[in-house]
Amino acid sequence: MTDDIWKFGQKGDSRFYLDVLTHDIKNLNQGVYGYLELMSMMPDTTEKQKKFLDEALGYVRMSSNLINSIELDSQTRANDQCIGLSKAINDATEYFDSLNSNMDLSLIVEGLSSEITVQGNLLLVDVFLFLLDFMLKRCEGGRLRVNIRIKETLDNSAQVTLEGDFKPPERESISELFYESDPLTGRKRGKLVFCKSIVERFGGTVNYFEPSITSGLGGGGFTVVLKEVLK
């Protein structure tokens, strides 16, 4: 559905899909969020139940945030949009930190300059948000350490490296993280294919790298390369 929206803009069925997504599904999310929040505040809800409700509330909020970003994205052309890289990363980490009270995020950011502007919009916030969430779901005890390193390259790009102490995916499944669904073979969409679609929309790339012996974190991570906007 979102691929159709991005490919055809305001034309044809994409306008219908966009209206459904940003109005009807947003309203459904608000209803779900309200009931989950009410359940979490009930006196007979156990601490274990509250933990799961807290995680569910976080996913509803992520969904609503993504819908808002898609709505904004639909209003302008992809190659006419730009965003400060520091804003995208800071918004993502701050929002991620607020999603789940049971989570402990330790973050170190290196090389981030407020002057770096890249092609993209608030959808890039969702990219970093979903990558961090993928790491969190594979870490132990709800505690996640992440190092984020930013460097500018010679080909007018900004490279963002996110490295964490999460459990690495099995080697045979790494190639499927960003895999598009294939009805002929029965292969399902990869868990991070949406991140790939967003980054490629703005002329960038995203890839997973395996853990190195010298990293000290042990989980590998992701490299996101984005095109810089000339100052």
Image (cartoon, grey):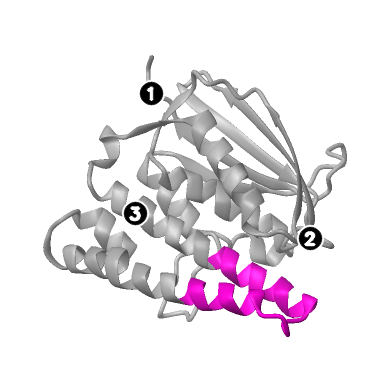
**What residue is pinned by disc 2?**
142
Q: Is residue 53 magenta?
A: yes
Residue 59, picture quadrant: bottom right
Is 192 on the left-hand or right-hand side of 71? right
Q: Which residues are magenta?
A: 32-59
Q: Label 3 amino acid?
A: Ile
Q: Label 2 amino acid?
A: Gly
**What residue is pinned by disc 1?**
229
**What residue is pinned by disc 3?**
70
The quadrant of the image that shows the C terminus is top left
Position of residue 74 measured from the top left corner of the image (x, y, whole percent): 25, 50
Q: Callout 1: 10 Å neighbours few (<14), some, many (20+)?
A: some
Residue 18 seen from this side: yes
State the residue lying farthest toward the left: 12
Q: CA distance from mark 1 to mark 3?
A: 21 Å
Is 90 on the left-hand or right-hand side of 63? right
Which residue is drawn at the image coordinates 58% and 68% (left, top)? 57
Q: Callout 3: 10 Å neighbours few (<14), some, many (20+)?
A: many
Image vertical order of residue 108 relative to residue 127, above or below: above
Judging from the image, what secondary structure is the residue with disc 3 in?
Answer: helix
Is 208 on the left-hand or right-hand side of 231? right
Residue 50, picture quadrant: bottom right
